[in-house]
Amino acid sequence: MKNKIGLVISREYLSRVQKKSFLLTTILVPLVFIAFYIGIIAITMKGSTDKEKIAVIDEANILNKASLDSLGNYVLINNKTEKVFVNEYKDAGYKAFLYIPSINIDSPKNIVLHSKSTMNLSTSFKIEQLVNKAIEAKRLAASGIAAETYKKIKADVDIENTIDTETGSKKSVAGVAYGVSFICGMLIYIMMIIYGTQVMRGVSEEKTNRIAEVMVSSIKPFQLMMGKIIGIGAVGLTQFAIWIILMVTMQLFIPLIFPDLLSNATAANATAAANTGVTSTILTGLSSLPLLKIGLSFTFYFLAGYLTYAALFAAVGSMATDDQQESQQLMFPILMPIILGFVIMTKAVSDPQSGLAVFGSLFPLTSPIVMMGRITYDVPWWQMALSMALLIGCFIFLTWLTAKVYRMGILMYGKKPSWKEMFKLAFRKN
């Protein structure tokens, strides 16, 4: 029996990994991710490319030349009115001009940014900051409060979350934990749908082409089903492992391929400095997470979740006909708990101890996705153990049940598939 299942596994595995489409997808996906990653770094480090001048008419005298000179491309215009300059600024080489009338600093109104087209968000935000800081400074001066005194009074506190463990304390970053949980849950969600659908299509194609009739003459239907499920699952693990290796390798070689990225990072560029801080924060957050626990849990829930749903997809594939619409109708009830698991996971990553999150991480049809949404938080050991036990039990039961459907459905032709027929096959005595 083991030898026959092994032959099916080998056939399913090799027939897929030797395809050009597999090789292209496996190599191109990490390349695309790295290309986007490099592009984001390069664009961010380059900074703003907007060098076009912006004129400023300040009738309220809240801005000073020093603050405008520090921005580089802002020019203070004197002896001009708004009505006159609105017809002249474009010909004078200005992209836009900011008009500040004589205002009451307690209730500033009628400040206008003139331009020939909609201003981008970055420039609009920069101008709003400039004006708000200037008005703030005027209000402080009117109240007799020195700017240095205000800086000392103003609170700007960052509260650090420290995790206390038996081996010491570690700094935690909530955003990193949230991101890791969400990404892990989303990956399992995507991979279960992709590789489960591949199982269904593989079974359906063999049934349609009558290859299954030849195969079941020398191997039991259950052996054939398990061989296909495990073989296609191994393809998924192989592809996933190659993606990780390629992305880590490319990450290491980025500084060698693009040395200017690191040299520019040390330049006097505020954006680059901010990026360095973000990177440091992410690394600090990752170091506080139980990465071994996350990795082992991800492997278990992916394998157990995939095997559970692959059995259901295989049963649907065995009942499918040439009509793709009928196959999709049969597949929809299987996709519903997967989608439900993803919806609950989006709640679990922000509130991991809620009743809905706990239920979703224990219910076998949603636990592979939801538990990964809670994995970076303090999940009680008994919940982890119960979740795994229920998932294994569900896999065994559904495999036994769907094997009965598969055994009859793989050789059934000329009959419209339905869930009613599948239940009859699943629960028939013989």
Image (cartoon, grey):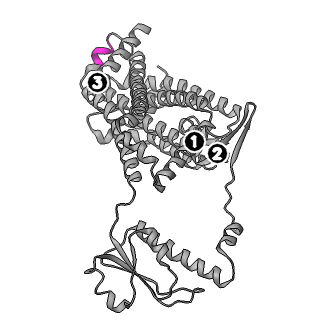
Front of the two marks 2 and 3:
2
- The tag earlier along the polypeptide, 2 or 1, is 2
Badge 3: residue crowd in 10 Å (few <14, some 14–19, many ≥20)? some
**Residue 307 pos. (x, y %):** 48, 27
Boundaries of the magenta span: 212-217
In the drawing, what numbered circle is on residue 352?
2
Q: Amino acid at mark 2?
A: Pro
Do the numbered discs 2 and 3 sit on residues whose CB atoms are within 8 Å? no
Which of the two residues, 103 or 357, is positioned nearer the viewer here?
103
Number of residue marks:
3
Q: Quadrant of residue 327?
A: top left
Q: Is residue 313 left or right of residue 358?
A: left
Badge 1: residue crowd in 10 Å (few <14, some 14–19, many ≥20)? many
Q: Is residue 107 left or right of residue 83?
A: right
Which of the two residues, 21 or 413, is positioned nearer the viewer here?
21
Q: Amino acid at mark 1?
A: Gly
The residue that label 3 is drawn on is: 206
**Residue 286 pos. (x, y %):** 58, 38
**Residue 97 pos. (x, y %):** 37, 80
Which of the two residues, 198 or 216, is positioned nearer the viewer here?
198
Say which residue appears at 46% left-offset and 77% top-offset: 65
**Residue 22 pos. (x, y %):** 30, 28
Residue 207 visible in this rendered orientation of the protein: yes
Do the numbered discs 2 and 1 sit on residues whose CB atoms are within 8 Å? yes
> Magenta part mainly helix, strand or loop?
helix
The residue that label 1 is drawn on is: 373
**Gap between marks 2 and 3 measured at Cα:** 43 Å
**Gap between marks 3 and 1 measured at Cα:** 37 Å
Task: Tell me the SS state at disc 1.
Answer: helix
Task: Tell me the SS state at disc 3.
Answer: helix
- The tag earlier along the polypeptide, 2 or 3, is 3
